[in-house]
Image (cartoon, coloured by chain):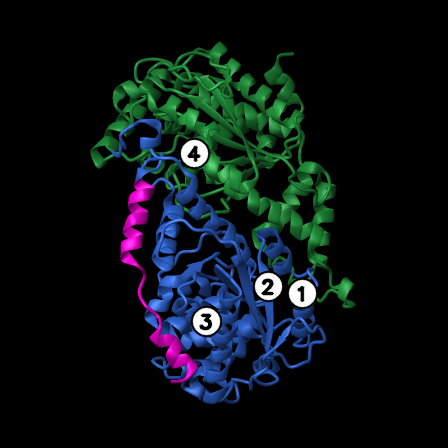
Chain colours: A green, B blue
Amino acid sequence: MDLLNKTLSHIQPLNENAMQQARERLDSLLKPPGSLGRLEEIAVVMAGITGSGGGSLKKKTIIVMCADNGVTDEMVSSFPRAISALVAETMLGGISGVSVLARHAGAEIMVIDIGLEGDVSDGRIINRKIRRATGNIARGPAMDREEALRAIETGIELASSAIDRGADILGTGEIGIGNTTTASAVLHAFTGKNLDEIVGRGAGLSDEGLLHKKDVIRRAVELNRPDPDDGVDVLSRVGGFDIAGLAGCYLAAAARRKPIVIDGFIAGVAAVAAMKMAPAARDFMFASHASAEPGVSAISGVLGLAPMLALEMRLGEGTGCALAFHIIEAALKIMNEMGTFKDIGMEATAP
Amino acid sequence: MDLLNKTLSHIQPLNENAMQQARERLDSLLKPPGSLGRLEEIAVVMAGITGSGGGSLKKKTIIVMCADNGVTDEMVSSFPRAISALVAETMLGGISGVSVLARHAGAEIMVIDIGLEGDVSDGRIINRKIRRATGNIARGPAMDREEALRAIETGIELASSAIDRGADILGTGEIGIGNTTTASAVLHAFTGKNLDEIVGRGAGLSDEGLLHKKDVIRRAVELNRPDPDDGVDVLSRVGGFDIAGLAGCYLAAAARRKPIVIDGFIAGVAAVAAMKMAPAARDFMFASHASAEPGVSAISGVLGLAPMLALEMRLGEGTGCALAFHIIEAALKIMNEMGTFKDIGMEATAP
């Protein structure tokens, strides 16, 4: 069996028994039942993922998939394509947005060149280049099916290697000029949602630029006719190597029963793609923040996951994940460290 | 001049010059302008507060005001009043919700008995009891004007002492059965907002209990006729010692130019009271989370401050502040640690 199908076959539901025990523990703690809101929900899901309440996040890894997109030939971005490789190089130098926030969170970053057009000189960037940028989806498919499968399996392999090296939680990030365009096309293909609801200004388009971007996406989906019931087909026709690679990360996390945090819009679209391939994979995901990209609320609806942070960020790179790790750790500490009514000699006084 | 008026006279606006420099620095960093959203706004406000960009939060202190409320005689809470003192004692034992989250955030907690009915035996709880619980606001005023002034000045003194001991940021928390009732009455008195918009279930009321709670609040405001233009009057007639004490904390933070984080509903109502006494005090506040109490969105509207976290918490105690500290620190690290386009040899390519 190939790696993708093998991974899909390993994805099992959350452990209901562990979740029930976590709920009981939470209700015994020194607080009105449910009063820690979504921190309690997070603790319950973590129990369902790992099979036991509590635990800790000793090692946290953010996987950043970097790739370029041929569709930038259509002038859908306000930044030049060459900047992707430059930004990727700043990551391990510690001066990019996600570098700073990952350090703040005590997380490591894995940066992968999965399809940058240029070459990067920093040897710490993992070279798994499928090809130098995708095709221009306004003119033809982004990649062929075999390349899409390779990109997904690359994501599976790298997430698995992070878990092998001890990661207790994964985060998802990406770099790639033009990837809000490809991500919007993928989301549109999967959901049929109106482009006005899902297409945003990316790194900073004008009103006119936004109209043009929507037009390009509409044309790309009409031309390439992705099959919404076939995740690999959608990714290959209108996706990107970064999105396909991240979809693989979600599948690996679910198969290995590790939590994985969704960053913003592009990583969210990859999460939708993973859910299309394996509906149960969704249960291992946490949504970090409500990005300023409008498509993020559409993604939350499809996944049924609400974000934890309301910071109107739209940088990508995995920046939201780094901040969400602190919240998920807080939820685990509530389980591990809070006292119970019994500890202070009282019956639980649930109203 | 008395301490309250002296404090009010020291409150000055944010430093516009430092804010402008912070904006310029943020726009030079390796990201599309504005793409770190509210993290950037936080960094700018921090610059306006401290007078310089960057900086760090070496010492973080959450001030927890504990007091009981005579209005619990009206059966507005699902918990017995005696539990306030018990919960206060768990705080310094490290097993309450805020103890766990403060430890996670590297913050210290100051717990103050500003009006508990019972006595606490833990000597680490600071005894500044104004009186054993307020009067029942459904039958008369919560306290007299002199007691309200003492409670506010107690908050000023304690926040100042935390700052004297090195706190770079303050958080606000409270304990007190019945204090969502008094807080709702104060908010209703200040804003005239419909009680359906501002009164919630507190620690867990039934539908019937909620109707009764609204009725008690309506009667309390009608009976006591607080003057919405006089913050001290509103606090004394329908408030609580916890709310008045926290209002003093906000005033002291503003006078001493330190950031102060609002927890949930009760601490938010205290923030509104502080703003009524000194409009510029608002600029030194950060809203941490969108509490499950409905009044929090009314408070956000009055203060013009949006919360950072969407966790549907309603425990109080300062739990939201502890989580928000991590976000504010992240904003400062963005200022201090991110590289610029110039660092990588590029002109800033703002679109």
Query: Please, which chain is the residue tagged with disc 1 on?
Result: B
Quarter in which the C terminus of chain A is drawn: bottom right
Q: Earlier in the sequence, mark 2 or mark 1?
A: 1
Dots 2 and 1 on the same chain: yes
Dots 1 and 3 on the same chain: yes
- Which residue carries the number 2 mark? B109
Q: Amino acid at mark 2?
A: Ile
- Which residue carries the number 4 mark? A95
Res B214 visible: no
- The reply to whether the C-beta atoms of the residues labelled 2 and 1 are less than 8 Å apart is yes
- Which residue carries the number 3 mark? B270
Q: Amino acid at mark 1?
A: Leu
Span highlighted in magenta in the image: B1-27
Mark 2 vs mark 1, CA separation in Å: 8 Å
- Does B25 lie within the magenta span? yes
Mark 1 falls on what kind of element? helix
Query: Farthest residue in the left direction?
Result: A208
Q: Amino acid at mark 4?
A: Ile
The correct choice, above or below, for B44 with respect to A316 in the image is below
The correct choice, above or below, for B166 with respect to A87 in the image is below
Mark 1 vs mark 3, CA separation in Å: 23 Å
Seen in the image, is A302 located left or right of residue A314? right
Residue at position x 38%, y 58% from top?
Answer: B50
Mark 4 falls on what kind of element? loop
Q: A90 or A263: nearer the eye?
A: A90
What label does residue A73 carry, if any? none
Mark 4 vs mark 1, CA separation in Å: 39 Å
Mark 2 vs mark 3, CA separation in Å: 19 Å
- The reply to whether the C-beta atoms of the residues labelled 4 and 3 are less than 8 Å apart is no
- Which residue carries the number 1 mark? B92
Q: Amino acid at mark 3?
A: Ala
